[in-house]
């Protein structure tokens, strides 16, 4: 059996002779065309090499390379993470209306969580801790020793990374009196800090005072009356949000019995009769469960809404009869 190299070498010699014969038999025009193709290939190869070198310089230069959304420059320092205004397009501008502050803050934190969930979580913890903001004759006064990135956990660890970008974002999302509250940070010579701006807005429009406690309690124990089937589902959901807000903001809650009484009191008359009949069926030693009663009322309201809502088949049948 002959070696593989001895078998391949005759084939290569035949191919070389064939190619040499082809080149010898080519006309001058064909040779010029082949030379032109070779020059174009060399030019294209040089351009690709130059482009690769340029991309390598851009990736390792001062402008920084991508690293999970954070730019890393040649000196190794991480750049700022931009909070793109387009990601907050669904957040309306807050004009200082106190009744709209919670919904505005909810939309802001939700959009923030879509970009960085850790940032949103730490911001919620900061607002829940409520750093002390002193109100002096209607003006906000910040203690000099206030720090939002203390190692004790009083503030977010992303403070130094996001403070400037968050401040610019909040400025663009506020107007009127709320914008004046945010603008006073720079007017007093303080560093532009978005976390400080949020705490100041919270101190102005969501202060934890005796008056706000009284208002929250009144909203819970005296809800608006529900008049029809369609309003029951929405009204119950909104009332439960107020109950949860009272617990979260002031750490106050109402007992189960009072909760049932207030719940039954805001229902229409026919639903109240159903609740009374259900209460009569409960034994004396057993407790009436709020969740069970709420679920029955909401299921009944959903069924009655579906019964009075026309379906496309019903409308089509009426048109056919006419």
Image: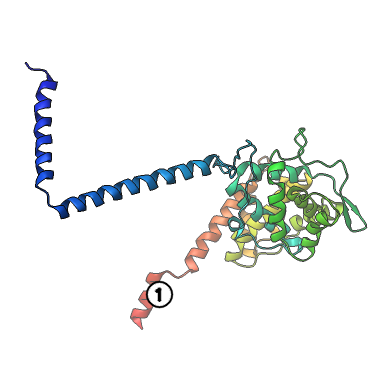
* Quadrant into which the C terminus falls: bottom left
User: Which residue position is annotated with label 1?
Assistant: 315
Q: Position of residue 238 (x, y in %)?
A: 66, 57
Pick out the residue farthest to the bottom: 322
Quick check: 322 left or right of 280? left
Q: Position of residue 45 (x, y in %)?
A: 34, 45
For the question of whether residue 276 can be seen, the reply is no
* Quadrant into which the N terminus falls: top left
SS at circle 1: helix
Quick check: 192 left or right of 38? right
For the question of whether residue 186 can be seen, the reply is yes
150 and 75: which is toward the camera: 75
Q: Residue at x 65, y 50 (%)?
A: 109
Q: Position of residue 296 (x, y in %)?
A: 57, 53
Label 1 neighbour load within 10 Å: few <14, some 14-19, many 20+: few
288 and 48: which is toward the camera: 48
Q: Position of residue 193 (x, y in %)?
A: 76, 49
Q: Residue at x 64, y 39 (%)?
A: 78
Decide: is 256 above or below 276: above
237 and 207: which is toward the camera: 207
Q: Residue at x 61, y 60 (%)?
A: 234
Q: Residue at x 43, y 46 (%)?
A: 51
The answer to which image quadrant residue 88 occupies is bottom right
Pick out the residue farthest to the right: 137
């Amino acid at each position: 059996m002959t070696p593989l190299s001895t078998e391949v070498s005759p084939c290569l010699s035949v191919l070389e002779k064939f190619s040499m014969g082809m080149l010898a038999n080519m006309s001058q025009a064909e040779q010029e065309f082949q030379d032109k193709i070779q020059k174009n290939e060399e030019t294209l190869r040089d351009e690709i090499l130059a482009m690769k070198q340029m991309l390598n310089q851009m990736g390792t230069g001062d402008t920084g390379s991508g690293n999970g959304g954070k730019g890393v420059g040649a000196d190794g320092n991480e750049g700022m993470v931009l909070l793109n205004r387009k990601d907050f397009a669904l957040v309306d501008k807050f004009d200082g209306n106190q009744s709209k502050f919670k919904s505005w803050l909810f939309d802001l934190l939700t959009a923030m969580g879509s970009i960085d969930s850790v940032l949103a979580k730490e911001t919620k913890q900061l607002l829940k801790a409520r750093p002390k903001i002193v109100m002096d004759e209607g003006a906000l006064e910040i203690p000099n020793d206030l720090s939002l990135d203390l190692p004790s956990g009083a503030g977010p660890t992303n403070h130094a990374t996001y403070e400037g970008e968050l401040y610019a974002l909040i400025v663009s999302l506020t107007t009127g009196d709320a914008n004046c509250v945010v603008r006073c940070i720079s007017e007093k010579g303080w560093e532009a800090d978005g976390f400080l701006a949020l705490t100041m807005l919270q101190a102005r429009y969501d202060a934890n005072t005796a008056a706000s406690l009284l208002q929250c309690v009144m909203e819970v124990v005296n809800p608006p009356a529900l008049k029809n089937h369609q309003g029951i589902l929405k009204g119950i959901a909104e009332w439960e949000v107020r109950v949860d807000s009272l617990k979260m903001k002031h750490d106050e809650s109402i007992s189960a019995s009072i909760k049932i009484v207030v719940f039954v009191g805001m229902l229409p008359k026919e639903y109240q009769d159903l609740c009374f009949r259900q209460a009569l069926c409960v034994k004396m030693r057993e407790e009436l469960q709020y969740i069970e009663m709420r679920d029955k009322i909401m299921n009944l309201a959903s069924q009655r809404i579906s019964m009075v809502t026309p379906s496309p088949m019903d409308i089509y049948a009426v048109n056919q009869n006419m």
